[in-house]
Amino acid sequence: MAGEETTVRIADENLAAKAAPLIGKLVADQVASKLTAQDPTLWGPDAESESSIRLSWTTLHKTSRPLIGEIEALREELRGEGVDRVVLAGMGGSSLAPEVITGTEGVPLTVLDTTDPGQLADALAGDLQRTVLVVSSKSGGTVETDSHRRIFAEAFAEAGIDAARRIVVVTDPGSPLAQLAETEGYRKVFLADPHVGGRYSALTAFGLVPAGLAGADVARLLDQAAAAAQVLGDDNAENPGVVLGAAWAAAHAEGAEKVVLADSGSGIKGFPDWAEQLIAESTGKLGTGLLPVAVDGPDAPGFADAGSDATPIAIGPGIPAAKIATGGTLGAQFLLWEFATAIAGRLLEINPFDQPDVEAAKAATRALLDNPASLEDGGSPSTVDGSVEVFAPEGVDTTGTLADVLRSFLATAPEHGYLAVQAYLDRLDDASAELLRPELAKRTGLQTTFGWGPRFLHSTGQYHKGGHQNGIFLQVTGNAETDLEVPDRPYTLGKLQHAQALGDGQVLTEHGRPVLRLHLTDRAAGLAQLVRAVQEVAR
């Protein structure tokens, strides 16, 4: 049968037993077929108005077909002009799926989902004569993406390049970006289906256009999703979307509010990072939800040694430590996890299509940018240790070394809580910051997430404010060697990045969550010092 390769296996007998009655109820209620038919009543009357305009993702394997020819035609045009370097400016759902698609297919795509001036400077240093910029924003007003567009447009002009001919837009119909693109005469505008939310948009123009222009086979991706759709719409107990959604909800009911995601040889590159946004933003609200913990692999701390508060999930062949394993092609996995997330939302009694707590951090950032004096230093540090300035929350002892400060801060974590490491740095040049997650997870026993700021604000940021309120937050910020002006805006990229860190920290503090900010006055030296301090923290 077509789509047989899309599989979900619950390896844990206890979890399978707990999920069985939920699966039976979902089948009896015909949830899978109703979801395929885009029934907006599945999540209750409070969610109906939102869900009624957010369900077109269930048929994208059909409705996105016309994009294939448009993308290929534009790619051939550009290549005929010597333009074969694709840079994507997008956040959250506008960047995560294209990055997975191109990574899996091994085609180059430069992704800008940052406000770090060093990372932008590196992208600008590429061959602009060969570069096309894809500007992707559903709302059309994403501040990071608008800043990228402004900076690149100026750089194109300074290089003697017609910027309008090198900018391609993906947005919703009628958005400010769509209007601007028309006014400026940008090369091509792809209007995405407005009835698909950003995190469900992998198979819309947001996922397909940048990936296709970079050289990925997007037709094959849609074929894979089409095969999976044949089984995901069936009302039976073997439906992998039903099984996965029920397993998540059953685990959550038993206290496993975290899902630890590791690739186990699927051949798909970076899938946990994409799934992280989907699950966190869809379920993390009203004080409940599932916290996705993306780890490097099955041997990473937090997976094989997951406690009772977490469910290890393998993407690929099943492995001994995994309680759940999922299998299938990339297009199939996209659709499978979207179905499962929507179904889990029904079982958790939340609306999986809104994100009520995302705006708070954006508003705090805007307020800080409107008051530049507040950005000068974010207040005085509690203490300074070498290249690290410490901004500690109330109750954390700052009289000792950096390792002592970390010990005191980590002690604020509640039982079965979690630690979120948030690095407002350059995810290429400062990649060693990712060492912090496994080192802290190994030494604390806490489920530990890692996110590059402000990228994570568009994914786990919703869960941090709206989900289970048992997290503690380690922010890492740093001085930038150079900064970049944002044309026609009263702030630099570095100031925007700083405002985003302070703004989110402010909102988390207002939610009663501990936030420890470590500011690196010298990034390289400070990161090395921080890793050493973490290694001194005993479990």
Image (cartoon, grey):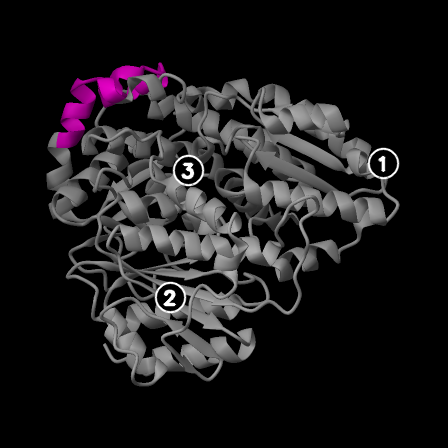
Q: Which residue is drawn at 66% across and 23% down?
A: 179
Residue 45 within the segment the image draws in magenta? yes
**Which amino acid is tagged 1?**
Gly
User: Is 420 displayed left or right of 30 in the figure?
Assistant: right
Select label 3 or label 1 by which is in front: 1
Which disc is residue 437 wearing? 2
303 within the magenta span: no
Near-viewer residue (531 or 263) = 531
Task: Write down the region rendered in magenta.
Answer: 22-46
The residue labelled by disc 1 is 80
Q: Position of residue 170 (x, y in %)?
A: 62, 30
**Residue linked to disc 3:** 333
Q: Which one is in front, 150 or 416?
A: 150
The x, y position of residue 275, in whole percent, is 40, 43
Image quarter of residue 38: top left
Q: Is mark 1 on a helix, strand or loop?
A: helix
